[in-house]
Image (cartoon, rainbow, N blue to C red):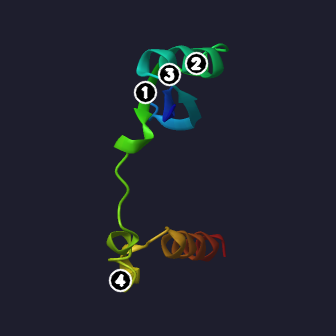
Amino acid sequence: MKTYEVFLKKAGRDEFRHAGSLDAPDPEMAVMYASETHARRAEGAEMWLVERGNVLVADPAILAVNDDKPHRHNDGGRVAARRKERREGDET
């Protein structure tokens, strides 16, 4: 048995999202199992199946490259606070 990761995409411009995993003896059975478990209620318009052994996993050190650069992690909080201050200043 091999483990497959199932990804579904709704119609339109939505991205593929991980829907779960399943075990199957071969790719054809994986497609059949995935359609039975993930496509019965029209959860997606497109489906990808990837054998888990073919998934590339990045080294966490690669993702930590920008930890020392907080200016790259702007969540918009400062801009929102500045806009709020200006709106409140205009009301007075």
Q: Secondary structure at mark 3?
A: helix
Estimate the spatial distance between the alpha carbons at disc 1 and disc 3, rounded to whole Å: 11 Å
* Above or below: residue 67 compared with residue 73: below
Please name the amino acid that badge 4 sits on: Lys
Which of pointers 3 and 4 lies earlier in the amino acid sequence? 3
Is residue 45 something that shows in the picture? no
User: Dot 2 corresponds to which residue?
Assistant: 33
Judged by depth in the image, the label closer to the viewer, 2 or 1, is 2
Q: Residue 59 appears at what percent x and percent y? A: 36, 67
Residue drawn at (35%, 77%) of the image = 66
Count of numbered badges drawn on the protein:
4
Q: Which mark is residue 69?
A: 4
User: Dot 3 corresponds to which residue?
Assistant: 30
Q: Secondary structure at mark 4?
A: loop
* Above or below: residue 45 compared with residue 20: above
10 Å neighbourhood of mark 4: few (<14), some, or many (≥20)? Answer: few
Please name the amino acid that badge 1 sits on: Trp
Which of pointers 2 and 1 lies earlier in the amino acid sequence? 2
Residues tagged 3 and 2 counted as in contact (Cβ below 8 A): yes
* Above or below: residue 71 compared with residue 10: below
Q: Nearer the viewer, residue 72 or 7?
A: 7
Estimate the spatial distance between the alpha carbons at disc 3 and disc 4, rounded to whole Å: 43 Å
User: Dot 1 corresponds to which residue?
Assistant: 48
10 Å neighbourhood of mark 1: few (<14), some, or many (≥20)? Answer: some
